[in-house]
Structures are given as C-alpha cells and as structure tokens.
C-alpha cells in the first residue's frame, strides 16, 4: 500500500505541468487577442439580435458566429500555451 501511495505521488510530480514565464511581449499579445475576441463576440451578439431574416437564417448565422469564435479561442489559447512552454 505504501508503494502504491508513493508511486501515485511520484507520478503526480512527474506529470505536473511545468510552465516557463511568459515575456512581457507575449503577455501583451495575449491580452490584445482577448480584447479583440471580446469585441468580435459583442459585434456578433448585436448582429444576431438585429437579425431580420427567417428563424433558420438567424440560427445559421448564430451557429457560424459561434464556430468562428470557438476557432479563434482554440487558436489563441494554443499559441499562449506554446509561449508558456517555450
């Protein structure tokens, strides 16, 4: 039982995330991307609220906006993670 406990503790230290510090430039770039994404999301919400087409057209536009937003989040977060690891 002791060996199992020590093994789990050792594994948790081995697989823990180790991040380097980001440079100031990388941090400002991350903040800039967050602000840009928030602004784009706000514009999408206004566009969706003002939709005058059919329900299907409005739902299609909303789905496209959500997909675009998700793609941007994934792209930005992966580059931020890469910067933290570098």
Image: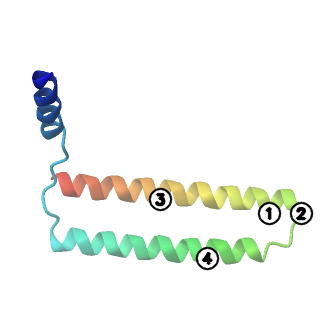
Decide which of tag 3 and tag 2 comes sooner along the chain. Answer: 2
Q: Helix, strand, or loop for circle 3?
A: helix
Q: Which residue is mark 1?
A: 58
Decide which of tag 2 and tag 4 comes sooner along the chain. Answer: 4
Residue 55 drawn at (x, y percent) = 86, 61
Q: CA distance from mark 3 to mark 2?
A: 27 Å
Residue pictured at 13% horizontal, 27% vertical: 7
Quarter of the image with the N terminus is top left
Q: Is residue 12 above or below residue 35?
A: above
Q: CA distance from mark 1 to mark 3?
A: 21 Å
Q: CA distance from mark 3 to mark 4?
A: 15 Å
Q: Which residue is mark 3?
A: 72
Residue 32 drawn at (x, y percent) = 35, 75
Q: Are marks 2 and 1 in contact (CB under 8 Å)?
A: yes
Label placed on residue 38: none
Q: Quadrant of residue 66?
A: bottom right
């Amino acid at each position: 039982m002791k060996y199992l406990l020590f093994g789990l503790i050792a594994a948790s230290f081995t697989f823990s995330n180790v991040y380097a510090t980001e440079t100031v430039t990388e941090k400002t770039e991350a903040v800039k991307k967050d602000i840009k994404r928030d602004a784009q999301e706000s514009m999408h919400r206004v566009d969706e609220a003002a939709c005058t087409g059919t329900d299907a057209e409005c739902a299609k536009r909303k789905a496209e906006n959500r997909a675009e937003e998700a793609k941007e989040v994934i792209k930005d977060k992966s580059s931020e993670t890469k910067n933290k690891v570098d």
